Image: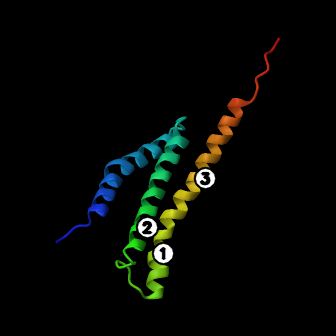
Amino acid sequence: CRSDDFMVAMETVTAWAWGPLSFLTFLAFLRHHPARYVLQLIVSLGQLYGDILYFATEARAGWTHSDPQPLYFWGYFVGLNGIWVLVPGLLLLDACHQLATAQRGHDRPRHKAH
């Protein structure tokens, strides 16, 4: 049995880093921790990076690990795997919006009360 070194390395990072970090992000949201959107941004960006590497690696290999039948390729390979791009992408945009809103509020000039 021969393993794909890239896939093993990527899944190792997923299991040991992104998994626990995702759980910490969940806890941060439950507790309304100030770092919750920073964590959301990091986890979402990491997921998107992994997705891009996954699709790029498969494209460079000529889609050899995907069934060429259109229903399978577009429905399963692109459609279902696309969810792993769509959801983190939306969460990344949400985190950026939340952080920019917070920064805008922080940057607003403060008036001293006399």
Q: Nearer the viewer, mark 2 or mark 1?
A: 2
Which comes before the other along the chain, label 2 or label 1?
2
**Residue corresponding to mark 3:** 93
Q: Amino acid at mark 3?
A: Leu
User: Which percent across, then down, holds residue 87?
Assistant: 53, 60
As drawn, which residue projects farthest toward the top?
114
User: Which percent across, then down, holds residue 53?
Assistant: 42, 62
Element type at marker 2? Answer: helix
**Residue corresponding to mark 2:** 56
Q: Amino acid at mark 1?
A: Val
Q: Nearer the viewer, mark 2 or mark 3?
A: 2
In the rendered view, would you say 54 is above or below 67? above
User: Which percent across, then down, holds residue 99?
Assistant: 62, 41
Callouts 1 and 3 close, C-beta under 8 Å = no
* Residue 21 image-quadrant placement: top left
Which comes before the other along the chain, label 2 or label 3?
2
Q: Which mark is residue 78?
A: 1
Separation (CA) of disc 2 from disc 1: 12 Å
As drawn, which residue projects farthest toward the right?
114
Which residue is located at x 39 percent, y 78 percent? 62
* Residue 76 image-quadrant placement: bottom left
Element type at marker 3? Answer: helix
Which residue is located at x 33 percent, y 52 percent? 13
- Image quadrant in which the N terminus is located: bottom left
